[in-house]
Image (spheres, grey):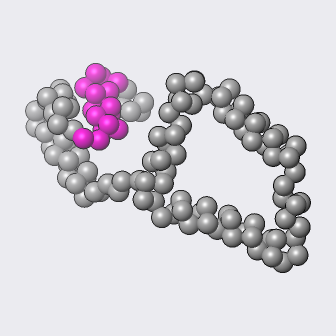
Amino acid sequence: MDVGTVIGIGVAFLAIGLGILFGGNPLALIDVVSVFVVLLGTVGATIACFPLAKIFKLHTVALKAVFHKSTDVVEIILDLVKYAELARREGILSLENLVDEMKDPFIVRGIKMAVDGTDPELI
């Protein structure tokens, strides 16, 4: 679970609560027309900017934002060093055999692009 996300949401609600507590009118925060304009406008703009396939996967992104798995950075660095040494000794094409055992989809995509001869600046 990503504690930062939970803390950020809590701080936002705390700010609203303190605004009400120190003399603000809670009804000033709830204007039905404004709520519809903001919420439906946001939904409409999001749908217009992204393909529907990605919109329907939005719930998985929201869950990942809260329940984030931490990655072992040291393990990733050691793997990248191993791949670099292998590529230097046997050539970049030798990495193609290791793609099946790679866990990180970002690294897999980068290795596949390198093996396919993609311009290094693009990778």
Q: Is residue 102 left or right of residue 119?
A: left
Q: Is residue 93 left or right of residue 13?
A: left
**In the image, residue 33 lies in the stretch drawn in magenta:** no
Q: Residue at x 57, y 30 (%)?
A: 55
Q: Is residue 91 visible?
A: no
Along the viewing direction, whichever of 109 and 57 lies nearer the viewer: 57
Image vertical order of residue 29 relative to residue 92, above or below: below
* Residue 99 in picture, x, y percent from top left: 20, 32
Image vertical order of residue 68 relative to residue 99, above or below: below
Could you say which quadrant of the image residue 96 lies in? top left
Image vertical order of residue 35 relative to residue 50, above or below: below
* Residue 81 in picture, x, y percent from top left: 20, 48
Magenta residues, start to end: 103-118
* Residue 68 in picture, x, y percent from top left: 41, 53
Q: Is residue 51 left or right of residue 119?
A: right
Q: Residue at x 10, y 37 (%)?
A: 89
Q: Residue at x 54, y 62 (%)?
A: 6
Q: Residue at x 66, y 33 (%)?
A: 46
Could you say which quadrant of the image residue 1 lies in? bottom left
Image vertical order of residue 12 relative to residue 58, above or below: below
Could you say which quadrant of the image residue 28 lies in? bottom right
**In the image, residue 117 lies in the stretch drawn in magenta:** yes
Along the viewing direction, whichever of 48 and 35 lies nearer the viewer: 35
Point out the image quarter for the C terminus.
top left
* Residue 18 in picture, x, y percent from top left: 76, 74
Instruction: Tell me which secondary structure the magenta stretch mostly adopts.
Output: helix
Residue extending farthest bottom:
22
Along the viewing direction, whichever of 123 and 28 lies nearer the viewer: 28
